Image: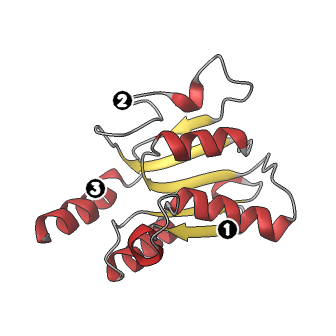
Amino acid sequence: MRRALEEAGAARATGDVPVGAVLLGPGGPDGEVLGHGRNEREATGDPTAHAEVLALRSAATRLGRWRLAGCTLVVTLEPCTMCAGASVLARVDRVVYGAVDEKAGAAGSLWDVVRDRRLNHRPEVVGGVLAEECGRLLTDFFRAR
């Protein structure tokens, strides 16, 4: 999560909402960082440039495949519906997030896309990792605006 927080700080520096993500290879918390991303919607004008999507793309490019089985997506904010769906479609084994997103969260808060029984893949979800630190970064960002 510390690496994801670094990515979030870099997003803030470009005027984007400070959300960062890393994709870890097999081995859980000790797995190799295969991909990383930060919100880049403002910087690129791309509505899909969320931290999670960019981390998944980065890892898929590095590995040369879209199936990311055995991997863990670590993100500072609970994924939205797009990012939760991308995690399911990429077949990641687990999604770990920091702060809860009560307005758009899709990993258990507002929706639960990641564990929807109607889908063919359901990653494990671990929430609340360094939640206070992740949440403070977002709160500070929006207060300054």
Q: Nearer the viewer, residue 23 or 112?
A: 112
- Marks 3 and 2 sit apart, C-alpha to C-alpha, by 17 Å
Count the marks: how many? 3
Q: Label 1, on which residue? A: 35
- Nearer to me, 108 or 2: 108
Q: What element carries label 3?
A: helix
The three-letter code of the residue at mark 1 reads Gly
CA gap between label 1 and label 3 equals 23 Å
Amino acid type of the residue tagged 2 in the rendering? Leu
Q: Nearer the viewer, mark 1 or mark 2?
A: 2
Q: Would you name the residue on which mark 3 appears?
A: 135
Q: Percent x, y for residue 15?
A: 31, 77
Q: Is residue 28 visible?
A: yes
Amino acid carrying mark 3 in the image:
Gly
Give the residue drawn at x 37%, y 76%: 9
Residue lying furthest top in this view? 118
Where residue 39 appears, x then y in whole percent?
45, 67
Residue 99, disc: none
Q: Name the residue under label 2.
A: 110
Helix, strand or loop status at disc 2: loop
Tag 1 near tag 3, CB within 8 Å: no
Q: Which residue is most to the front?
A: 45
Name the secondary structure under disc 1.
Answer: strand
Taking the image as shown, residue 6 lies to the left or right of residue 92, namely left
Question: x, y percentage for residue 134?
Answer: 33, 59
Q: Is residue 12 above or below residue 105?
A: below
Tell whether 24 sits left or right of 85.
Answer: right
